[in-house]
Image: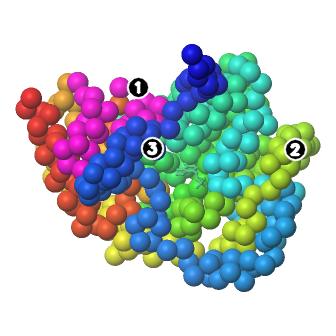
Amino acid sequence: MVASITPSAHLADVRYEIRGALTRRARELEAAGLDIIKLNIGNPGRYGFEAPAHLREAIARHLHDSEAYGHEQGLEIARETIAAQQRARGARHVEPERIFIGNGVSELIDLSLRALLQPGDEVLLPSPDYPLWSAATILNGGQPRYYHCLASHDHQPDPDEIEALITPRTRALVLINPNNPTGAVYPRALLQRLVAIAARHRLLLLADEIYDEILYDGATFQPLAEVAGELPCLSFGGLSKVHRACGYRVGWMSLSGDPARTAAYRDALQLLAALRLCANVTAQWAVPPALQSAPTIGALTAPGGRLHEARRIVLEAVAASDYLELVAPDGALYAFPQVRADRFADFDDEAFALRLLEEESVLVVPGSSFNVPRSRHFRLTLLPPPAQLHEVFVRIERVLARMAHE
Ligand code: PLP
């Protein structure tokens, strides 16, 4: 008998359903000739969005300068630009030495937790979360401790609940703002309360701000680092969403706050960055032009812009639905509707998503994929052409009507 290769037990509790079993099924259906409307990934390039031309041109100009390994923390000129952006936002003591560029924020989420956690350490995570945060916590020996961001509270965290979850093992508080999947944007007063909690319990603040400039209807983004002041805070941003360049795989993290308190942690991050040599050098040349020129995303999120229009169509479709409700997203690239409790006493979000795929050729992500047990939600991206989103909701309504009458 041939012994099979056993994968690591560390993976037992790790999930990433945004590209999971449903996606594999969608690929099978596509291979069989079906036209699947895929709403599972916030990947602007797949829906006809383009990165600004000056990013592409900068990369092309510097192709020849990109053949050697670069600095483990990223190109100096790119880190200077990121540090300047962070300082302009009010982050303290941010110098290029405290900036780390990675192959997407994804790589840096893992790195930040790997440099921090001892086995059994706890990390405060939102539920729903962007599931890489849970996965990276678990893979690095940590324990997720979830605070709720419920639709009934406009998907805002409750600082009292967060503080009650803290134990002597708690090391960090993760905030995703603007939030994926809920689209919530957090006001300054809330961030001030969370910073006060982090200060009282000596927690590291981890601020995933990859959607920082994707805002609707006058919502304003408050960088956590500015509120945190001298408190250690690691803020994450990147080219994938605001600059519509997911495939470049460029993200960064910026360490702010009292340098004396973060020196050892900074050195640990540098060691881990060095172990993987450097991030893709070619695409890092897009960072200076991306951050030095006026943001281009506003034309898409302002009234009349494609993302604004997509969001409007989703809000209208949900308002007209017999089965759905939705807290309007204030930011990011998603809507996170839920089925109404008076329509479905019991709702199996995974069965719904599978039926929507099999019966109506639409791929969404069930709410439970975002570490919410027994979710009544599903997530879709706002990236498709607005007219297609209209059609999507016709199909969603048909499946829900069938489920309601069975
Ligand atoms: N953080 C959040 C909240 C995200 O939604 C995503 C991607 O969807 C990432 C991080 C990873 O982004 P990147 O493409 O920079 O790896």
Q: Earlier in the sequence, mark 3 or mark 2?
A: 3
Residue 88 is left or right of residue 183, and the answer is right
Write down the residue under mark 3.
Answer: 18
Label 1: which secondary element: loop
Q: Are marks 3 and 1 in contact (CB under 8 Å)?
A: no
Measure the alpha-carbon separation of dots 3 and 2.
Answer: 31 Å
Distance from mark 1 CB to nearest ligand 1 atom below 8 Å: no
Give the position of the N terminus as an image quadrant: top right
Residue 103 position (above or below residue 344): below
Amino acid type assigned to the residue bearing label 3 in the image = Ile
Residue 173 sits in quarter: top right
Q: Could one spot residue 336 in this view of the protein?
A: no
Alpha-carbon neighbours of circle 1 within 10 Å: few (<14), some, or many (≥20)? few
Q: Where is residue 45 shown, x and y percent of the image? A: 47, 67
Residue 390 is left or right of residue 92, and the answer is left
Write down the residue under mark 2.
Answer: 271
Task: Identify the residue at horizontal 35%, vertical 31% (top origin).
Answer: 375
Measure the alpha-carbon separation of dots 2 and 1.
Answer: 37 Å
Write down the residue under mark 1.
Answer: 373
Q: Earlier in the sequence, mark 3 or mark 1?
A: 3
Q: Which residues are magenta?
A: 346-374
Q: Could one spot residue 103 in this view of the protein?
A: yes
Label 3: which secondary element: helix
Distance from mark 3 CB to nearest ligand 1 atom below 8 Å: yes
Amino acid type assigned to the residue bearing label 2 in the image = Leu
Alpha-carbon neighbours of circle 3 within 10 Å: few (<14), some, or many (≥20)? many
Q: Where is residue 71 shown, x and y percent of the image? A: 86, 60
Residue 175 sits in quarter: top right
Question: Is residue 361 inside the magenta stretch?
Answer: yes
